[in-house]
Image (cartoon, rainbow, N blue to C red):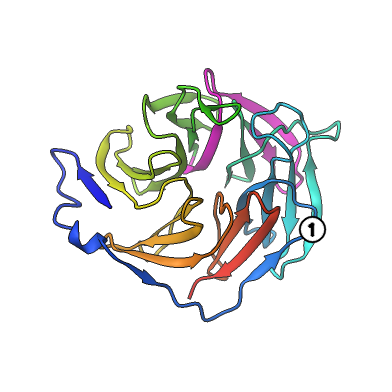
Amino acid sequence: MHIKSAPHQFLLSGLLLALTSFSAWADTAESILIKDAGFATPESMEYYADEDVYLVANINGSPFAKDDNGFISKVTPDGQVSELKWLDGESEETALNAPKGMAILNHRLYIADIDRIRVFSLPDGQQLTDIPVAGSTFMNGLSVAGENSLYATDSGMAPGFKPSGTDALYRIATDGQVQQLRSGSLGHPNGVIADGENIIMVTLGSGQVYFLDEQGGTQALMTLPYNRLDGLLKLDDGRIITSSWAAKSIFAINGDYTIDTITDGLESPADLGYDSKRNRLLIPLFLKNEILIHPLN
């Protein structure tokens, strides 16, 4: 494991030895695994607090295909699928190809979909508009940045998961303005979250955690032992939660930058959600067509 600080930053200095070991996270409550429910390539989950329900983004096929067959499911906290295709790309009312990251802001649901952000009203699910992201190829991670904006990543991948060269981090305003904060060789960005006025981002290819300022400049860079990082959350207690396909695990990065394994043995844990009411992780299992509701204790 390796941490690199920007020359003017000392946030992570002196922590290399502390990061050489992992500790187990004790589970004291039962998880809920939902399978054989009709999910089709579930990529992300989001807690919709106003309805106390979990939203599941289903790519339903290739993550690159503009096939208009993606859908969003609703799942109750006790693990019941209340609406398998609440939003359905195959319906005349909805355009949705390969939905990935989701975020809820100001009674709107924002969904990353290949080269644009789809916008739906809540609670009715009416499709409002698209925000095209010019030059993008694989819009993926999405999170709230502030009262009127979101952060979004382009993982920079083409069909066959080949590099497309479009790796980027964006700030997207709710009025449709798109600002590219960072581009270039970024290790295929995926999960992204606001951290106060700063930004945290993880990567699929390089297995790194970027600590960025609000303009996308690197403050510090942390390299985990495993790559294929996907989901990203920050809890109120300061822990950073990320999922790794390579490790088949969910990790917590603590305030002192040591790492705990929250749960392991997971096949393709993708973009994470968080049930703030019940202190639960919401974990889509991309290749299994399953989702896991996992309590944090």
From which residue to which does the magenta span run?
118-147
Whether residue 191 sits left or right of residue 220 in the image: it is right
Could you tell me what secondary structure mostly forms the magenta stretch? Answer: strand
**Kind of residue at disc 1:** Ala
Write the residue at 28% across / 52% down.
Answer: 1
Towards the viewer: 203 or 296: 203
Are there few (<14), some (14-19), or many (20+) residues within 10 Å of tag 1? few
Q: Which residue is mark 1?
A: 37
Q: Position of residue 178 (x, y in %)?
A: 49, 24
The quarter of the displayed image where residue 61 is located: top right
Task: Reply above or below: 166 against 264.
Answer: above
The quarter of the displayed image where residue 68 is located: top right
Q: Helix, strand or loop at disc 1?
A: loop
Write the residue at 79% across / 33% down.
Answer: 94
Write the residue at 65% across / 33% down.
Answer: 118
Write the residue at 76% across / 38% down.
Answer: 126
Whether residue 222 sits left or right of residue 205 in the image: it is left
Q: Which residue ends up furthest to the right in the rendered image?
A: 92
Task: Reply above or below: 295 against 134.
Answer: below
Q: Position of residue 123 (x, y in %)?
A: 72, 49
Question: In the rendered image, is residue 146 in sight?
Answer: no
Question: In the rendered image, is residue 172 in sight?
Answer: yes
Towards the viewer: 130 or 212: 212
The quarter of the displayed image where residue 280 is located: bottom right
- Residue 133 is one of the magenta-drawn residues: yes
Task: Reply above or below: 159 against 246.
Answer: above
Q: Which residue ends up furthest to the top in the rendered image?
A: 135
